[in-house]
Amino acid sequence: MSPVALKKMRTIIQRFLCPRSVCRKPFTSSSGFIPYQRNKNDHSCEKTLEEDNEEEPQTFLGNISIPKKKHAIQMIYCGAGYYGMQINNTTPLPTIEGQIVSALVKAQCIPEICSTNLKLIRFQRCARTDKGVSALAQVISVSLFDNCANPVEVINSHLPPEIRVLGVKRVTKGFNAKLKCDARTYSYTLPTFALSKNTGSFPDSSFRLPREDFHHVNRLLSFYKGTHSFHNFTRGKLSDDPSARRHIHSIFCSEPFVRHGVEFARIVVTGQSFMLHQIRKMVGLIIAVMKGAATPEFLPLSMQVSKINLPLAPALGLVLECTHFHFHNKRCHYNQSTRTITWEEFMPAAEAFREEKIMPVIIAGELEDLSMFSWLQQFSGYTYVII
């Protein structure tokens, strides 16, 4: 075979083994989306964004038109009384998504047939919050009809007051709320008596967390920073499961504050992504150490040994504080696109919603229903051990 023919044959084989669609597929890992690192001479981001902006042809299901214009919906909600974010078509239990999808149908943003098959409108949530968990920065991506002049007002008119849409924005057809999110920030609000060994387990208006205990909590929290295997902080994960490896960017306990005479604090954690119950177990272990039910050595051991039973803190104080889209926004700025996902303009509304809807539920849960007090009873005369 001549050199020219050999070269042609090699080219054909390479194209067959590595088609362009596969080569250009974004890299993913077990811990979630890993942004593509573009060098200064690479213009593939610009080309990809142009391709993403192309309109898809209108499709029909029978004689029903299916929306094709992708939008990002930025929303906030109080999770009390709801069985998590994710819709469940097999049970009648109320969920946040159930309310949102119903409102989108009533607002004529999507056809009713799509409410039972969200794949038709490419529905995706940024974070899957658990039962009772609230959010101040949730994002969903979904294909909508573009026929509503004031979509925020119209959608909110069909939602209960504990769920509010802040913005509806056109995004590229390739936008996926889950994959484009670089990191999530959560906070966990709790009464400070839960963070001190030298106090009881009942709300006491005279108690104030000693500074030494405050600094000790932050030292313990620092063990979580970095990349670790959090297989013991969820369920159904083995110690050698690569999907249990998660990266924590930052975690700290904020300065305490007083409500209704009782002192509270917030543990704030930012990570690339989190597993089911992970943050509540992270908080639960810190409380167990502070209360003397576990030794500080449990923190590093919990990420090394195959199996440890860890306490699961109540869901009441957990709030999704922010969802971050750094790489997506950087890519938009590079291409001079306005389709960024930011929260600055909504911060006043979000803080007002926190004070009006979320904090009263947390305060009432702690002072009237004694959520943390009841949960702390499991530590009485009990020590966590390795099994």
Image: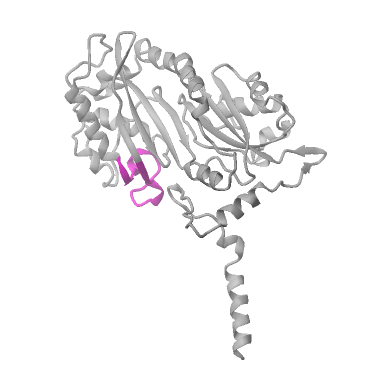
**Residue beneath the point at 24% across and 24% down:** 379
Q: Which residues are magenta?
A: 225-248
Tell me, yes or no, if residue 344 can be seen here.
Answer: yes
Q: Residue at x 57, y 16 (%)?
A: 161
Report the front residue among 363 and 144: 144
Q: Looking at the image, is 265 positioned above or below residue 240?
A: above
* Residue at image coords 47%, 35%: 323
Residue in view at x 78 percent, y 38 percent: 65
Indicate the position of residue 118 as horizontal and vertical percent values.
Answer: 64, 37
Check if residue 39 falls in the magenta segment.
no
Residue 293 visible, this angle: no
Q: How is the image coloured?
A: one colour
Q: Which quadrant holds residue 120?
A: top right
Q: Nearer the viewer, residue 84 or 227?
A: 227
**On the picture, is 9 further left or further right than 130?**
right
In the shown orientation, is residue 150 left or right of residue 62? left
* Residue 125 lies in quadrant: top right
As displayed, is residue 376 above or below residue 20? above
Above or below, comparing residue 251 to residue 154 in the picture? below
Residue lying furthest right in this view? 63
Q: Position of residue 4 (x, y in %)?
A: 62, 86
User: Was residue 226 drawn as part of the magenta stretch in this picture?
Assistant: yes
* Left or right: residue 219 compared with residue 270: left
Looking at the image, residue 75 sits to the left or right of residue 368; the answer is: right
Q: Position of residue 7 (x, y in %)?
A: 59, 82
Q: Position of residue 282 (x, y in %)?
A: 32, 34
